[in-house]
Amino acid sequence: FRGVLGLRGDFEALGEGSVLESWDWELAGVHSSSEAVSRVPDLLLDKLGEALASCPKTTIDRDVSSPTYMMQIPSSIKDRQEAGCFNPFYTAITGEGTVNSAEVIDYIDGQLKAQNTTRILIGDFSLSGPLFRLPGGDLALAVGAQFRQNEQYIDYDNDYEDEAYAFNLGADDWRGKQNVSAGFAELSLPAVR
């Protein structure tokens, strides 16, 4: 959103018969606001840890022909996959290893979300006109002032603030504000023509 408003006029009626009669004024204002949302995929560390830790180290041997039938034996990758564990050794690039289930991937996947809001407010005012006549022309004065306010706010999601992502470091929400004021005066002094 952006809005601009400008007004200008003179003091002809108000200053009739005085030096202000030929003075001009100008008033302007700008307000601008923008919002942007960014989303970045990442892994949630706590859920990744849970998916890795949920893998049983042992299982019961159910093979009746095995000498270890009904005994605790080390679990295989297949056993771990069937239990819904995350296999960190699978690579989608070469297709090697046991594929992770969609449920496991959905469980550990996260998405960093940040909303960035920026606002700008500007207002300025100026006056100009002659003070009196000199041999080279009118001695004129111009004065003015401007105020500008810049504001930015970034709102991160809770997981980012809690440093829950694997690759994106966390941070708190951020707010910044800057106020700038300025003024000017200009004198036109035509000494000779």
Image (cartoon, grey):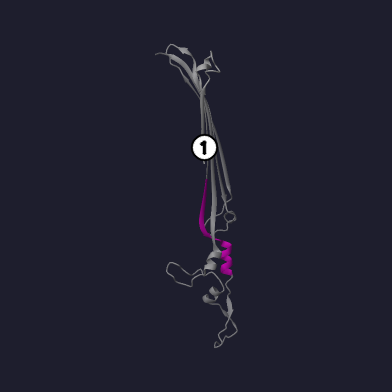
At x 51%, y 26%, the residue is 8
- Amino acid of disc 1: Gly
At x 54%, y 45%, the residue is 117
| Place of residue 126 in the rendered image (x, y in percent of width and height, measured from the top left) | 51, 25
User: Does 188 lie within the magenta span?
Assistant: no
User: Does 44 lie within the magenta span?
Assistant: yes
Tag 1, which secondary structure? strand
| Place of residue 125 in the rendered image (x, y in percent of width and height, measured from the top left) | 53, 27
At x 53%, y 66%, the residue is 105
Using the rendered view, name the quadrant where residue 69 is placed. bottom right
Number of numbered discs visible in the structure rendering: 1
Q: Which residues are magenta?
A: 35-53
Looking at the image, which residue sits at the far front?
13
Looking at the image, which residue sits at the far left?
193
Viewport quadrant of the C terminus: top left
Q: Is residue 104 above or below residue 78?
A: above
Looking at the image, which residue sits at the far top?
135
Tell which of 54 and 11 is nearer to you.
11
**Residue 182 visible, this orientation:** no
Give the labeled residue for mark 1. 3
**Residue 9 visible, this orientation:** yes
| Place of residue 189 in the rendered image (x, y in percent of width and height, measured from the top left) | 45, 17
| Place of residue 3 in the rendered image (x, y in percent of width and height, measured from the top left) | 52, 37
Q: Is residue 186 above or below residue 120?
A: above
At x 48%, y 20%, the residue is 187
Q: Residues within 10 Å of mark 1 (few under 14, many from 20)?
A: few
